[in-house]
Image: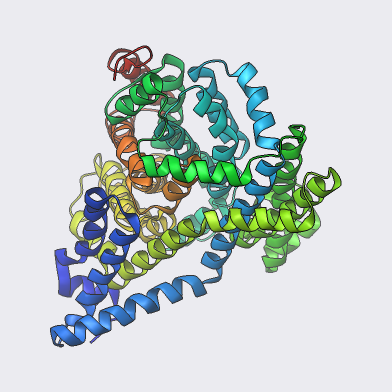
Amino acid sequence: MLLADAKANAELFGSLTLLPPLVAIVLAFITRNVIFSLFMGIFTGTFMVNIVDGSVFVAFAGAFVDVVRKMIGSMADSWNAGIILQVLTIGGLIAVITKMGGPRAIAQKLATKAKSPASAQIYTWLMGFFIFFDDYANSLIIGPIMRPVTDKLRIAREKLAFVIDATAAPIAGIALISTWIGYEISLIKDAYSMIGQPEINAYAIFVETIPYRFYNILMLAFVFFSAYFLREFGPMRTAAIRAASTGKVSKHKRQEEHLNQESSTMAPKKNVEYSMWNAIIPISVLIIVAFIGFYFNGLHSLEGEALKAVEANPYSFSSIRDCFGAADASIVLFEAALFASIVAIGMGMQQKIFDLNEALETWVFGVKALVITAVILILAWSISSVIKDLGTSTYLVSLLSDSTPQFILPSIIFILGSVISFSTGTSYGTMGILMPLTIPLANAIGIHVGLEPTALSDYIILNIGAVLTGAIFGDHCSPISDTSILSSMGASCDHMDHISTQLPYALFVGVVSIVFGFIPAALGYSATILLPIGLLVIALTIRFYGKPFLNTEA
């Protein structure tokens, strides 16, 4: 018997609802094979719901059938399909512009400016701020551009993947205009309606949460300070020593063999004159078309008063914000990547770098190179669906949300958000689960302890910030996170190498966010005081606890 009610499943299975994500995560670290681990996690969940009132054999057969259904359902979802097409198409675009010599020209130019590992990492960090509007686009674009530069300077692929991952979701999550904001605002507005405040300005609330996004802000600072001081600790330092002393930027030989095959297939011809414009123009087209697409796609999705407001003042900041928020980012980015691919192919043919057949062969090769990423994404979405059916998140919330003191609630929400995000691999899903619970809970606790209206409003906003940033923290730590998977792919880094080296850094920043952020903020201290203290703690830790790795024997 397959139970469809997540709440009923949470009550039936209890702590066993944690089993599927735990199986996937543990196997990922043991086998270092994400596909196998995700499949086994999905199978564990489908087996659990099929074993109820059934024999083991029937449950085994039913579980296998349900795994297939989950994967087909993930592919059939229009958002997921758009993401897959976007990923594959950007892979084709990157292959074409690589064949045209564009990234190599940029690498050569940046190499003259990024003359040290520190400057190369800082340039990568800065590029993340320019592609602020979407975390997927950030992960997919920056890696292929900066990889030749960081390879030349013997920067470990693990560090490149970390810089990309740490400047993707943290920036998109706090950007005033992005593909995230519409979803976040809608969650905030709906949750405020539950406490009798349906007319609240949700965007203004969103802006007020930004100082309380301690993890986002401190993680961005961590990336900068680690690059500036050129100091690392934990597994990342081991990877940095390996790359600096031996030139082996990737840990696994099979990764290097794959890259050698990739570089030989997409390498520019000897008679090609390298030009930065062969990369700058197609990528600029990608970004510009994406911006235009976000506006018009979102405009067509608006209705009622929101549409009238945009029509009355179509180019105001609020109109652009509303259109971006209502846009289907997966479809828009696919359209932008496809159009940019056409532009790149046209440029290459006009320069006689390749003919149409060779251009399409190169583009298809780039698509095929990312099929493995598409498979992993499908499996990651499938396990999220299984976890939702089992009621894992419902169980976690019920376990941790009772009888919570006022001063500790934001930290509990942050930790709970990170646990759910880590277990499910999705920031969006975590926000959707926690926001409707957090705002009423924070409001009730604030009223119970007698907070004044202004203090109560600030307290609710602090807890909203804990939801939004906790989801990103858990996502950073999770091996089944789609954003982390894309960051690994963009850096051509083994995915589990990326997770195992990033995890200690994410945990450290998470602890700093709680100790110097959420706990004192809940006690009434201002974020204008807490953020500088947190930044100082991050800088001093890297400077004095972190150790240099250059000119060091492995």
Name the residue located 49 percent from the left edge and 39 percent from the top edge: 491
Image mark count: 0
Q: Is residue 481 left or right of residue 104?
A: left
Front residue of 3/272: it is 272
Quadrant of the rendered image containing residue 128: top right
Quadrant of the rendered image containing residue 264: top right
Name of the residue lying farthest toward the front = 270
Relative image position of residue 238 (x, y in whole percent): 30, 26
Q: Is residue 353 left or right of residue 481?
A: right
Name the residue located 17 percent from the left edge and 81 percent from the top edge: 51
Name the residue located 48 percent from the left edge and 60 percent from the top edge: 374
Front residue of 79/520: it is 79
Say if 117 sits above or below 198 in the image.
above
Viewer can see residue 196: no
Viewer can see residue 28: yes
The N terminus, quarter of image: bottom left
Name the residue located 47 percent from the left edge and 55 percent from the top edge: 188
Relative image position of residue 189 (x, y in whole percent): 50, 58
Relative image position of residue 309 (x, y in whole percent): 73, 58
Q: Is residue 378 left or right of residue 399?
A: right
The C terminus, quarter of image: top left
**Figure coloring:** rainbow
Name of the residue lying farthest toward the right = 350
Front residue of 452/416: it is 416
Relative image position of residue 342 (x, y in whole percent): 76, 55
